[in-house]
């Protein structure tokens, strides 16, 4: 009987690991990504990515598969020097006019001036949920880990393992939450000098082109989107490989909350939930809810 239990346990463990393996995307850009524009401006060699922008074109890639829930991370080194007018984007998105999207965007600046870490969220085609931060490090001299963690309870934006923002699921209270559409992973470098730097007042200096951003160690530990059947499957807490549904991932720890508060107190420069003029005093409903 003991031998039978051991064999059964081993079978369950192997099955769980096999399922887990199907949720893991290894860090190989050329294997897991396709070019969406700027083919001549992109380099993908194994775990390394090179995005280039000049006056003729920018560059962009996206993942071959979509996911619903899990954790997606990429190490990114931003455009050095005078990067005014340029934007490096790294985000998850579905398709269509009622799309869902979770954003990291990095808005360039003049030499010596800080980047802006721009975050946003679209649910069923509606965005306007921006929060912005100044980096507390130089994002151009080395690679930094930008991670989007997304589960049925909350979305968390991480920088080098530190959470900077949370959006909780209040769908039961009538607040839309992205949990019914698979999203692919996108990365791009493009010119946005009509708005990116000081509202478009500082333009891209094309004499400094080409502008280059780099990526490494893209990794997705996430549920593979296989159509509407995934809405239930990827959120099922009884599936061994759905690690993101564990109660330990439904709420930040005390230490994580402490670290996040330090970043938000010291480096946040814009929060849509505090912009009463923008919304005419009628704030988005999630702004009155506890996110942390």
Image: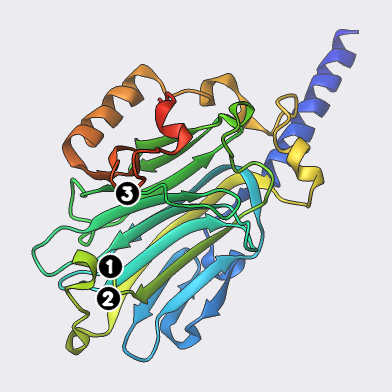
Say which quarter of the image contains residue 289.
Answer: top left
The residue tagged 1 is 196
- Closer to the camera in the image, 109 or 23: 109
Asked whether the viewer can see residue 23, the reply is no
Closer to us: mark 3 or mark 2?
A: 3
User: Element type at marker 2?
Assistant: loop
Q: x and y percent of residue 277 in the render?
A: 28, 46
User: Element type at marker 3?
Assistant: loop
Q: Residue at x 43, y 70 (%)?
A: 188
3D distance between C-alphas at marks 1 and 3: 19 Å
| Within-10-Å neighbours for mark 2: few <14, some 14–19, many 20+ | many
First in sequence, mark 1 or 3: give its number: 1
First in sequence, mark 3 or 2: give its number: 2
User: Element type at marker 1?
Assistant: loop
Q: x and y percent of residue 250 in the render?
A: 53, 24
CB atoms at circles 3 and 2 under 8 Å apart?
Answer: no
The quadrant in which the N terminus is found is: top right
Asked whether the viewer can see residue 281, the reply is yes
Q: Residue at x 34, y 81 (%)?
A: 53
**Which label sits on residue 193?**
2
The residue tagged 3 is 278
């Amino acid at each position: 009987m003991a031998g039978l239990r051991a064999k059964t346990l081993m079978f369950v463990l192997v099955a769980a690991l096999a399922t887990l393996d199907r949720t893991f995307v290894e860090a190989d850009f050329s294997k897991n990504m396709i070019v969406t524009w700027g083919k001549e401006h992109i380099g993908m060699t194994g775990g390394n990515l090179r995005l280039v922008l000049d006056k003729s074109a920018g560059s962009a890639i996206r993942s071959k598969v979509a996911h619903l829930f899990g954790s997606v991370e990429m190490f990114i080194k931003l455009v050095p020097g005078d990067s005014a007018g340029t934007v490096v984007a790294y985000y998850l998105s579905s398709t269509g006019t009622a799309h869902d999207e979770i954003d990291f965007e990095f808005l360039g600046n003049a030499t010596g001036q800080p980047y802006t870490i721009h975050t946003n969220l679209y649910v069923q085609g509606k965005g306007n949920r921006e929060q912005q931060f100044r980096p507390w490090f130089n994002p151009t001299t080395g690679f930094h880990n930008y991670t989007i963690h997304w589960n049925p309870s909350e979305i968390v934006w991480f920088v080098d393992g530190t959470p900077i923002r949370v959006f909780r699921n209040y769908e039961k209270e009538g607040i839309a939450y992205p949990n019914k559409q698979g999203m692919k992973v996108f990365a791009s470098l493009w010119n946005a000098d009509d708005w990116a730097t000081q509202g478009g007042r500082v333009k891209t200096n094309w004499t400094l082109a080409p502008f280059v951003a780099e990526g490494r160690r893209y990794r997705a530990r996430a549920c593979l989107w296989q159509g509407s059947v995934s809405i239930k499957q990827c959120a099922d807490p009884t599936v061994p490989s759905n690690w993101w549904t564990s109660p330990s991932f439904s709420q930040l720890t005390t230490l994580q909350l402490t670290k996040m508060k330090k970043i938000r107190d010291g480096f946040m420069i814009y929060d849509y939930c505090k912009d009463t003029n923008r919304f005419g005093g009628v704030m988005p409903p999630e702004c009155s809810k506890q996110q942390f």
